[in-house]
Image: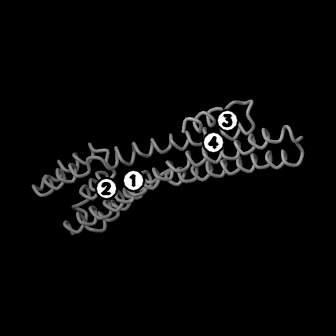
Amino acid sequence: MDVVIKNTLASFDPSQAGWQFMWVILFVGLAGLGVAIERFLYIYMRSSSGRDRFLLEYGRLVADKKYEDAVSFCGRSQLPIAAVLGAVLATRDKGKEAMVASSDATFLTEAPRVNRYLSIIALIASVATLLGLAGTIFGLIITFDAVANKPAAERPAALANGISVAMGTTLLGLFAAIPLLVIQGFLSMISERVIQEMEEKSLKVINSFA
């Protein structure tokens, strides 16, 4: 394992063939990680965390017919579901159609914010994989060139260099892509649950006042 790490780090040296691929893959992976962290903070920390406590307090206020307090409570929360339920409750006296329209309008604002940029994480993971593949092809070109054109004395070193480039870029591309795909799948699952819950709870509140 130490040898793999040592050789991978050495591949970033500009004196090594294929170093450009290593740096580009690294930057692409870091960009994807940055997007993933931002999405994690928004989807998991802001949009998901604390939903149970919010719904419990919201239900208590509605059950006690403290509607204005419930609307104010929703306004103080950063949860997307709070915005939807607050919009429904604010139009409760205008009939079912008004509540549905208000819920839909708020939902169309909040839902895209929840799943925004998730496809970009998957795209960046694919780009990292393809860059690793491009580095592999580059390394194979070096290998075939060594077989065809290098003197016998220089051939083993050239072959090793080409294979090293091919394997190193592939490895780094996979190291960048696999975690990003796992994170993207996890965040997609949470965002889908948040969106479904917004639809479900808003419909229940609308039906309770209709």
- The earlier-in-sequence mark between 1 and 4 is 4
Give left or right: position of 77 versus 138.
Answer: left
Give the image's coloring scheme: one colour
In primary-sequence order, the first of circles 2 and 4 is 4
Marks 1, 4: nearer the viewer: 4
Residue picked out by circle 1: 110
Q: CA distance from mark 3 to mark 1?
A: 45 Å
Q: Callout 2: helix, strand or loop?
A: helix
Q: Is residue 51 left or right of residue 46?
A: left
Task: Point out the image quarter for the C terminus.
Answer: bottom left
CA gap between label 2 and label 4 equals 41 Å
Crowding at mark 3 (Cα within 10 Å: few <14, some 14-19, many 20+): many
Reading the chain from its start, which is encountered first: label 2 or label 1?
Answer: 2
- Give the residue at mark 2: 84
Image coords of residue 166 (percent x, y): 70, 46
Please tell me which of labels 3 and 2 falls first in the chain.
Answer: 3
Residue type indicated by callout 1: Glu
Q: Residue under label 4, please give it.
A: 25
- The amino acid type, in three-letter code, at marker 4 is Ile
Q: Residue at x 34, y 56 (%)?
A: 194
C-alpha gap between disc 3 and disc 2 = 52 Å
- Residue in view at x 29 percent, y 47 percent: 49
The amino acid pointed to by label 3 is Ser
Pick whichever, 89 or 59, lies toward us. 59
Percent from the top left, x then y, of residue 96? 27, 68
Say which of marks 2 and 4 sits in front. Answer: 4
Residue located beneath label 3 in the image: 11
Residue 150 placement, left or right of 125? right
Q: Residues within 10 Å of mark 2 (few under 14, many from 20)?
A: many
Instruction: Count residues near mark 1 (Cα–Cα under 10 Å), then give few for <14, some for 14-19, many for 20+.
Output: some
Tell which of 157 and 15 is nearer to you.
157
